[in-house]
Image (spheres, rainbow, N blue to C red):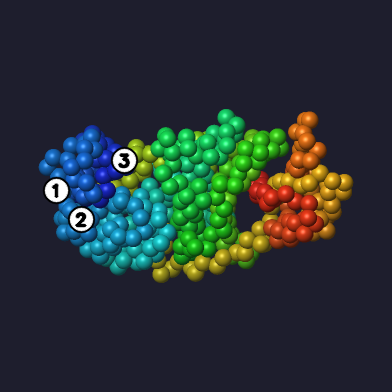
Amino acid sequence: MADALKIGIAGLGTVGASLVRILQDRHETLATTCGRAIEITAVTARDRSKDRGVDLAGITWFDDAVSLASQGGIDVFVELMGGTGDPAYASVKAALTHGVHVVTANKALLAAHGIELAEIAEKHGALLNYEAAVAGGIPVIKALRESMTGNTISRVYGIMNGTCNYILTKMEKEGLSFEACLKEAQRLGYAEADPAFDIEGNDTAHKLSILTSLAFGTAIAADDIYLEGITNISIEDIQAAADLGYRIKLLGVAQRTESGIEQRVHPTMVPHDTVIAQVDGVTNAVAIESDILGELLMVGPGAGGDATASAVLGDIADIAKSRPGAQHVPAFGRPANALLPYKRARMQSHEGGYFIRLKVVDRTGVFANVAKQMADNDISLESIMQHSKHYADPAEPKTIILVTHATFEASVRKAIVSIKAEGYLVGEPQVIRIERPKAW
């Protein structure tokens, strides 16, 4: 049997502790399946005295991650600290520069510095593996980077943030407000004390930028993503969607268009009878459409200690199974210098259906005027209806719900501007895109 693979772990939070436990509990099984033992020889974390529920006896402790990465005598550096800056960035860079393989779960780091780090890895003959960075335990990185080689991918999309999916699911099933569901998510540990990164869509955007690079062979462009979070989704939207046969999900979507690559993150209405509409709670789902394979949908746990540690372990096992001199798979599926410049498709050219909710003053002619504004902008309506509460005060605003056929975003935005100018709107209109894929 080959010499043991020596690994150093930076970060001993939920995922790091789970990884240590799994590696220790399954040491013999992994040695058999990988053809060599996997040994944790060094670790580092912020608090050396904290009880993490795992045995660290006999493992060398480093006070900083950069020293562990560059001087730890390890074969693989596992980065589980998070963040785009130091110590994560400096330590990963140091490891790769010294020819040490890197396994990371840090999507923010990859979105910000992924191409640079891939170039360093290639220069020094090191691997940069990051299955756990996107969709937790779902093996979507391996699918795009290796299994689907030769396929031309037209679209990749999915539910990539468990916090948002939990909140939207709970709003629908229990009829609670966004604020109430967010508080419950925080209580259960699904949402951070400051949840903005998740609920504003940034976490999904980072993950989507990585998938876009893998799917379309382009440089990462995390700053070129159209972004909407879920903070403006109301229980009224959830209920209206249900009445129309839809559920609302926060989707990340990247697709090839005639004008470039379109990347967008936003709340989306999906038909209730589709598979992705049934993905509830903190579960994630990623779908890939390609010319050879067709449509692939992968569903599984998107976060959590064991799920993420499982993905990290898979990357470590791949390295353990590789042999000296074997050709490495490039971090983004092709050499970094072969990645194409990212060409952003204009969102105003997006074509698809829309749900539009308007609150209007109750006066004669408003309903007809709304329909006219849509027609004047060449928007074909699938349905238009007025919602009003039984015995409601006539002075209260009325709600008009519109569902359009496939149309251009520019037309919808132009119609909304015209409606605002008429003076009968109360508050801001709600616009949610409708996705009707070929088969989910």
The image quadrant where one finds the C terminus is top right
Percent coordinates x, y for residue 397 in the rendering: 75, 43
Disc with the residue nearer the chain's start (3 vs 1): 3
Number of the front mark, 3 or 1: 3
Q: Is mark 3 on a helix, strand or loop?
A: helix
- Disc 2 to disc 3, C-alpha distance: 19 Å
Nearest the eye: 37 or 151: 37
**What's the residue type where badge 1 is placed?**
Thr
Disc with the residue nearer the chain's start (2 vs 3): 3
- Disc 2 to disc 1, C-alpha distance: 12 Å
**What's the residue type where badge 2 is placed?**
Asp
Left or right: 127 in relation to 408: left
Residue at x-position 27% and y-position 37%: 22
State the residue position of label 1.
60
The image quadrant where one finds the N terminus is top left
Q: Which mark is residue 64?
A: 2
State the residue position of label 3.
14
Residue 391, compared with residue 157, is above or below; it is above
- Total labels: the figure holds 3
- Disc 3 to disc 1, C-alpha distance: 20 Å
**What's the residue type where badge 3 is placed?**
Thr
